[in-house]
Image (cartoon, rainbow, N blue to C red):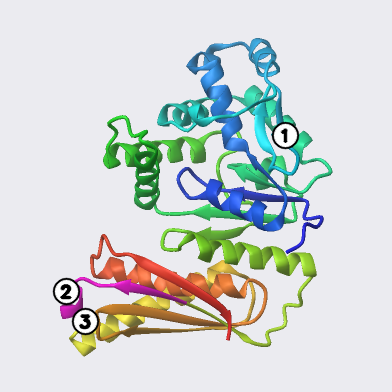
Amino acid sequence: MANDSYGVITMDGPAGVGKSTLARRLAAELGIAYLDTGAMYRTLGLRLGAAAADMSEAALRARCREYHFSLEAPEKGADPQLCCNGVPVGAEIRTEKAGRLASLVARLPVLREELQRAQREMGEGSSLVAEGRDMGTKVFPSARHKFFLDARPEVRARRRYLELEARGALNGETLEQIQRGIEARDAQDRGRAVDPLRPADDAVIVDTSDLDLEGVLRVILDSVAVKQAGTSPACSGPVHAGVRMVLSPAACFMLQNAEKREELFARARETGLAAAHAASSSSCGVALSCTLQGNGVFVAEAEAEEGPLARLRALAAAQAAAARLAEELSEESVTIEASLPGRI
């Protein structure tokens, strides 16, 4: 896609859902700026600390205004970076401590007002991908393109663990501790009185639990393209998506029983079609098949009639079917690989 007037594209969701990676990729694909609003909360959380909660409104507002955020390119032709008082925000904010402090200060109305004002200023008259927790509901309610990403807590914890492990930043934390922290932060973010975490009414909701990065990115790019071009909702051609899942020997043995296999596959198909329906209000249909290959690989293939968010509907059906079967078979550590070849 060429760099055009996309306006603000919002991407919201809980911690560990993959927002940052996807938002960066989306901004790069579209040739527009990326605004990591969570980094702004993390920055002020570290600068002000937990003591911010005990400050008077006037004192807190004055402290917040000591920090000016901007998007600046370090050199000509480079991608803009988030800066605080002219200095690029660095790796010091990517710790669990910074995340906990961010969630704490995010509950303070004055601090939220100040950061939301700064975010709106950066979004005025420019095209950018704004990633956070209330972009589509509070900060940019008129944005044309809105997305809400979600994933199961255990999936998000595993992703976060691997990310910290790769950076050598685990600091002794276990997977179980990270998951408890994510669940606690979810409760805090979703339950706060001020701007709670929730999807905007007109947001496209994408569950990334069983999808790879490329699959989610294609769904989002398709959605943006549809709205940019004003694509007609008429259904004219199929879009295919599929997922494959390698099963354990125990699961394969269970599925040798034809009656049991059909019962489980029927429930998987039902769940997949329900997910496709929930993913888009389009009336275009989705067909879904479930098969077990001889090498112990389960395959869910979906075909969606072309129309608004056709790839999202196809991919939602296939991934939900695979996830349902994994749950039924108690397959806790399977890898689900998504493929989205496009129009056939």
Q: How many marks?
A: 3
State the residue lying farthest toward the right: 125
The front one of 295 and 17 is 295
Amino acid residing under circle 2: Pro
From this viewpoint, is residue 106 visible?
no
Amino acid residing under circle 1: Glu
The magenta-colored residue range is: 242-254
Q: Which residue is mark 1?
A: 72
Using the image, determine if residue 238 lies above or below residue 143.
Answer: below
Using the image, determine if residue 159 lies above or below residue 249.
Answer: above
Q: Are marks 3 and 1 in contact (CB under 8 Å)?
A: no
- Tell me the quadrant of the picture where the C terminus can be found: bottom right
| Chain-order first, disc 2 or disc 1 | 1
Q: Position of residue 285 (x, y in %)?
A: 58, 83
Around disc 1, counting alpha carbons within 10 Å, would you say few (fewer than 14), some (14 to 19), or many (20 or more)? some
Q: Which residue is mark 2?
A: 249
Q: Is residue 46 left or right of residue 139?
A: left
Q: Which mark is residue 255?
A: 3
